[in-house]
Image: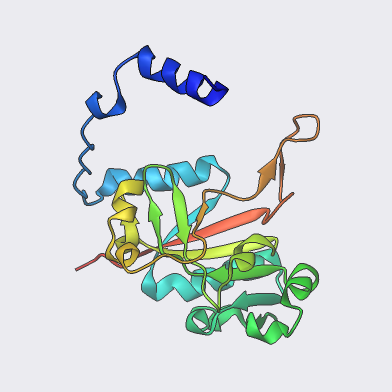
Amino acid sequence: MSTKQNILARLRASGPQVANATFASKPEVPAVVEVDANDVSRFIECLQACHAQVAEVSAAMLATRLAARVRAHGLTRLLVSEQLQPIAAECGDACELISWQSLGDAPVAKLFDEVPAALTGSFGGICETGSIVLWPTAEEPRTVSLVPPVHFVVVYKSRLVKNFTALLAKDEFSKGLPTNLVLVSGPSKTADIQQTLAYGAHGPHSLEVFLVDDTAQ
């Protein structure tokens, strides 16, 4: 008997075959539950616990609040997609608005050297973990939220979900996924060196979230 035959014989003699085994039934996917005020509070608290700044604003005040934060940081350049440029319109002449496409053939190098901040939209947010969901596009590729030291992001309350299961149940996911989906829960941080916590080591040192209430009737 060969070694292979010997192994197979021992396996067959060791117990019941797979065909006779019983398997647990497939778990049911829980129904999607709408978020309530407590969920929104948890979303904010989780982000703040990770050192993100969260401002609850109305759609009408969004541009004004963004402009105030841009001035507070002393920013002279802000990367923003064409879609979000109306929101950045009040930033003033002292802050130049640029797009990803305007960075030319070497956008990543310029992103590191010449862009101190970026404003992006978001796909939504997960209340249970305080995670912002970014769906990268041609105008807002993943690096836009990773490289500039300051990241402003707009999250609409109507796009919040209770948990990750509810996120996956959204219709958009049945139509196809992007090449990557980014979940952000705070500014970049590390404690690799002498366990000293430092922010901005591998990404933005500041994450500022504008939570826009678009749910009012």
Q: Is residue 160 left or right of residue 194?
A: left
User: By what rule are the colours in the image chosen?
Assistant: rainbow
The total number of labels drawn is 0
For this rendering, which residue is in front, 193 or 15?
Answer: 15
Q: Position of residue 186 (x, y in %)?
A: 56, 49
Residue drawn at point x = 70 percent, y = 60 percent: 149
Residue 52 shows in this picture: yes
Q: Is residue 34 left or right of residue 136?
A: left
Residue 23 shows in this picture: no
If the image is split into quadrants, where does the C terminus sit?
bottom left
Residue drawn at point x = 37 percent, y = 14 percent: 13
Q: Position of residue 187 (x, y in %)?
A: 61, 50
Residue drawn at point x = 57 percent, y = 73 percent: 67
Q: Position of residue 29 (x, y in %)?
A: 22, 44
Q: Is residue 18 left or right of residue 66?
A: left
Most distant residue in the front direction: 1
Q: Is residue 118 left or right of residue 198?
A: left
For this rendering, which residue is in front, 140 or 213?
Answer: 140
Q: Position of residue 134 (x, y in %)?
A: 48, 62
Residue 58 against residue 190 in the figure, above or below: below
Residue 144 against residue 56 in the figure, above or below: below
Residue 119 against residue 150 in the figure, above or below: below
Most distant residue in the top direction: 14
